[in-house]
Amino acid sequence: SQQGEEDPQALSIQEGENATMNCSYKTSINNLQWYRQNSGRGLVHLILIRSNEREKHSGRLRVTLDTSKKSSSLLITASRAADTASYFCATDPTGGSEKLVFGKGTKLTVNP
Amino acid sequence: DAGVIQSPRHEVTEMGQEVTLRCKPISGHNSLFWYRQTMMRGLELLIYFNNNVPIDDSGMPEDRFSAKMPNASFSTLKIQPSEPRDSAVYFCASSAVRTGGLRQYFGPGTRLTVT
């Protein structure tokens, strides 16, 4: 199956709640990135975590990485209606290629 | 910076016609990627260039698809002849030389509909 599989596929929460999305991957990586895609738009980079890092924060975003389990999670705290979007993880596999491998994404809906 | 520019934003064409999608990467970026996104298959990498040279075209679905990058500021993705199953959103993305992370900057996409 494709590297970079997000879970859940869809998530619906109320404004103010936290949203957690997970990503699993299969091979060794240099880093893992999370992107957001609003409906009808291109993907926008949110945060990058390197393979030697375990946790990273950016504003209301918190990303964790467990290389032993080949998994990552994205936590959005105090969600807002504007956070409604699809969220993708992308892995940068070791091996020298410039390719990122994207998952199929989690569709997050934040209800006002 | 204007970001990655793609044209056209929307394209509707009939089966059998030639389609050309265009991309202008961010100035100074030396890697360019073409992706296709559909509900069924998600985001697929078609081809990527580094310093204007095609590096990996293993994602190009068949010979009807071709891509060129004649210079650092322009790339095209051509489909000839087009088929209804080519209907998708096509994204172009660019990134800078590997410096510890490959953040990609995406264009707004071209929504292609083949009838």
Image (cartoon, coloured by chain):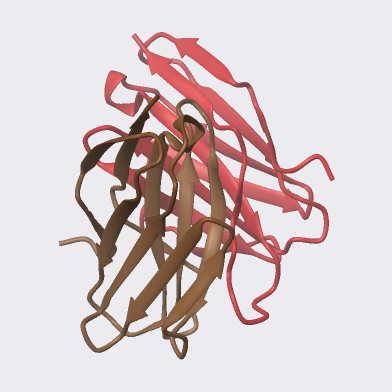
Left/right placement of residue B32 relative to residue A91 reads right
Q: Is residue B6 above or below residue A20?
A: above
**Residue situated in front as seen by the camera: B82 or A94:** A94
Among the 4 quarters of the image, the one containing residue B104: bottom right
- The residue depicted at 22 percent of the width and 61 percent of the height is A2
Q: Is residue A45 above or below residue A65?
A: above
Residue A89, image x and y in percent?
38, 59
Q: Is residue A107 above or below residue A34?
A: above
Residue A98, image x and y in percent?
52, 71
**Residue situated in front as seen by the camera: B52 or A75:** A75
Check the rendered structure and report the hue given to chain B. Answer: red
Check the rendered structure and report the hue given to chain A. Answer: brown
- The residue depicted at 72 percent of the width and 48 percent of the height is B25
In the orientation shown, which residue stands out farthest toward the left?
A1
Left/right placement of residue B33 relative to residue B28 reads left
Residue B71, image x and y in percent?
78, 52
